[in-house]
Image: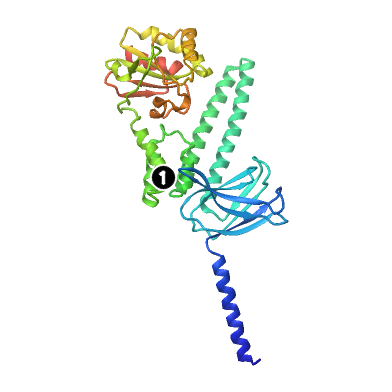
Amino acid sequence: MTYTKIFYLIIIVACVSSCMEKGNQEGIKLLGNVENFPAMGFVHLEKITDEGVVKIDTLETNESGNFSSYVSIDEVAFYRLNFSDRQYVSLILTGDETEVTVNVHGNDPRGFSEVSGSYDTEYKNQMDALMKKYQERIGQYQQQQIAARNVQDYQAFKEVSNTMMQFGVQTEKELKQLIWKATPSLAAVYGTQMIDSDKNYSFLDSVANEMLAEIPTNYHVQNLVSSLEIKRSLTIGSEAPDIALPNTEGEIVRLSSLRGNYVLIDFWAAWCRPCRAENPNVVKVYNKYANENFEIFGVSLDKTKNAWITAISQDGLPWLHVSDLKFWRSKAAQTYQVRAIPATYLIDPSGKIIAKNLRGASLEAKLKEIFG
């Protein structure tokens, strides 16, 4: 064989090899190592959609627990690697990534995992780390509060409480900085779930607008925008959405029927211990201001009528009560975006929201401000 023929043969082989490699390397190269996983096991790549979790690809590990495959991503979205339902690793993928490496324990829901090569996922993980630090520190402060209360050292209790509050403010500031830095990544949408939307509505609205400009049709972005639109209707100064639910006799009662009064909408339930503990305070202010155009509209998130009515009787709650007995799926709770109870909204005689989540001393102070 001549030199020229050998040369052309090398070129042809190189071309064939290159073409085959290119054909097999479409999408993102997803690779890594699983420390505690069956040899030749399967790892599923799943996508979070509006219809739930959908499996879109399967990767196989070798004898050493390594896996490597090219995966195609059709849109910016939240994904996760499912290690036989033993551990999940969340990812945010855009399709622009070249190579994403995931090293993981693989056999422990709380096991370690590390991800590199995904700009968006790295932001998400920074947010998770910040909140983990916050939760750990808050737990320490709460233990200090308990210790101070046990020895009746109220000065120490107050100092710890103030420190805890300042730490919370600082953490929220750092989280907002991370969210804004990540925008318009989906990591920003992820982070918005960690901050108080009532106190940070303007900030969240700005994030949503940036996200809309970048990926307007994305399911998660549309969800954020929709939730903020609902939140906009629940801001201070907005007209309170009407509620129409059955009372204890099965008759439909409307919140709007109380127009002309200051009304405290009180979301609670018989099964909610903090609610039951707060009820004596609510009874106290009701008895004090009931003759001064003040009403309470109790909305129960109970599941059974018997538990609901029994709690009303046991706690001596003489105001209006309604419920559709649908637990967290209560229509009123969804309308008012109630995620935890007790939760309250105070509306004025014209039906506008003037305060939220008042209870105990703060509720009494607000009513004193109104009625003198």
Q: Count numbered badges in the picture.
A: 1
Compared across the picture, whether 148 is left or right of 78 comes to: right
What amino acid type is highlighted by mark number 1?
A: Val
The quadrant of the rendering that contains the C terminus is top left
Q: Which residue is mark 1?
A: 221
Residue at left 27%, top 15%?
260
Residue 151 position within the rendered picture, expressed as x and y whole percent measured from the top left: 64, 15
Nearer to us in this view, 223 or 236 = 223
> In the depicted view, which residue is nearer to us: 241 or 24?
24
> Residue, x 62% and y 19% (percent of image)?
148
Residue found at x 41% / y 19%: 323
| Outermost residue toward the bottom in this view | 2
Q: Is residue 241 left or right of residue 3?
A: left
In percent of the image, x 66 and y 42: which residue is there? 111
Please tell me whether mark 1 sits on a helix, a strand or a loop: helix
Name which quarter of the figure residue 288 lies in: top left
Picture coordinates of residue 335, whole percent (x, y): 38, 29
Compared with residue 190, is residue 33 higher up or lower down, i.e. above or below? below
The quarter of the image holding the N terminus is bottom right
* Neighbour tally class for label 1: few under 14, some 14-19, many 20 plus, Cα within 10 Å: many
**Coloured how?**
rainbow
Q: Is residue 115 above or below residue 192?
A: below
From the top left corner, tell me how far across and down residue 189 is, in percent. 45, 43
Q: Residue furthest front?
A: 250
